[in-house]
Image (cartoon, rainbow, N blue to C red):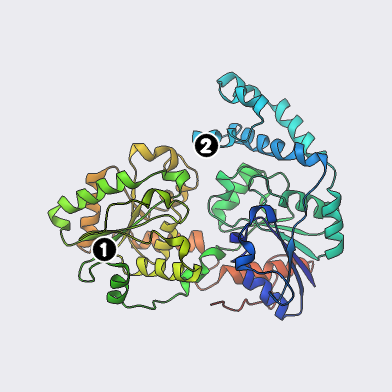
Amino acid sequence: MNILFVITHYNFWAPLDPIAREYVAKGYDVCVLIDRARNANFEMRYPFGPGAQPYHMDWSASRGDAWQIILNPLRELISYIAYLRLRKPTSPLLTERWAAYVPFFLKPLTRTEKGRAWLSRDSVWNFLRRLESSAPMARRIKRELANVNPDVMVAASAILPYSKETDYLKAAKELGIPTILIVPSWDNLTTKGTLHVVPDHLFVWNPGQVGEAEELHHIPAEKVYCTGAPKFDSWFEIEPVFDRRTFCERIGIDPARPYLLYLCSSEFISGDETAYIMELAEGLQRDPRLSELTFLVRPHPQNLAPWKNHPPNGTGFAVWPVNQKSMAPSDMIQDYYHSLYYAIGVAGINTSAFIEAAIMNKPCIAIAEQRFARTQMNIPHFRHLLDAGFLELVPDQEGFLSAVAGILAGQDQRQQERKQFVLDFVRPRGLETRALDVMARAIQNIAMGLQPDAVTEMSVERSA
């Protein structure tokens, strides 16, 4: 059996690596193609060369023809218009974000209501879709697929802007190779544009994403398969290495004091959170109910710049870690786990870390001030968390302080909602069923010409 993976960014490969290794152990041929232009540091984590990996790895091909110049802006223009045409209007922030991808000569149309209405017309939409679909198969990609000759091709995120995976999926379908597209994150279907090709199978986390695939990307429900969220499998298996005292001393906070963990958001969601977080810290320090509490702030790993000159850590307040880029990935994950494990609860605005906190069964406070509405309440993927009812949603600093005081006093009224959310959103096939195992079996079945959920022998060895 021959299985091909096509990957835009190595961050999407880490969860799939154990699947590829298990396939190799079963005697399958596995080939992994990575987009070189998007992965400057890839070889540091997954070195190329004979024996470097048990499977074959190489750089993916580019179209290398005149159509590539046309297709990149055309596809992102289509994604922009797709947001304009939604039956349920999405956040203006997403349409504004995608307006940046619109070709310069059409940008004036994005700035007026009449211009946006013209772009949204059926005639414009249909013309652009026909133009995109008329592009011939890329010859380089066709030759590469012919050389690999896979029984199935798996793409990790063709929905990302300028993804080569779209051309690979189209070429594979034209050549009669079964295709699978994986949705690797909770927000990909709602915030990363639209799909330009319907794969034979779309793997999503949960039934909520099935609805998103159908409504936003016009993928028939019968082509969508729920695997659960492989990204979070390790959170059901990881265990503490340090006791609480050792961990607190390691990061420089008083082990005798309970701490609340604030989980920062990405730059797109929150921008520079430092001033707002300091307001919260000052409020916590003034509140007599919370005099013994430490406020531990964890910067987002992709939004570290605002914290380079943060106020010094002191009694009741700490920022950690600021130098995450210098940490080994395994150390960063382990330390992040410990920060959640020993916290009395977590707080934030809009972050996937709420999912990890729910898996860890930690009370979660979401601050819903008007200043964050564009990137929180109006962002579609945040509704998954909000509708599940496990977040303690507070409107302002006063509500935040009261919620923290309640957690410190031992109040936890949303425990059942957290457990139900984890079951519904992260592991819809059962809390004891690893999503990675479900996905591995489904890929194997499709390569064999079977339905994804056919009963076959397949279990992925747990990776360290």
Q: How far apart are marks 1 and 2 (CA)?
A: 36 Å
- Kind of element beneath mark 2: loop
- What residue lies at 69% left-to-right and 36% top-to-bottom? 73
Q: Can residue 450 be seen in this view?
A: no
Measuring from the top left, give residue 302's x and y in whole percent: 48, 53
Q: Is residue 378 visible?
A: yes
**Residue 398 located left or right of residue 125:** left
- Name the mark on residue 90: 2
Mark 1: amino acid: Tyr
**Residue 437 located left or right of residue 137:** left
Q: Say if 27 sits above or below 424 in the image.
A: below
Q: Which residue is denoted by mark 1 in the rendering?
A: 259
Is residue 98 or residue 312 the one in the foreground?
A: 312
Is residue 412 or residue 244 the one in the foreground?
A: 244
| Dot 2 crowding, Cα within 10 Å, few <14, some 14–19, many 20+ | some
- What residue lies at 74% left-to-right and 75% top-to-bottom? 50
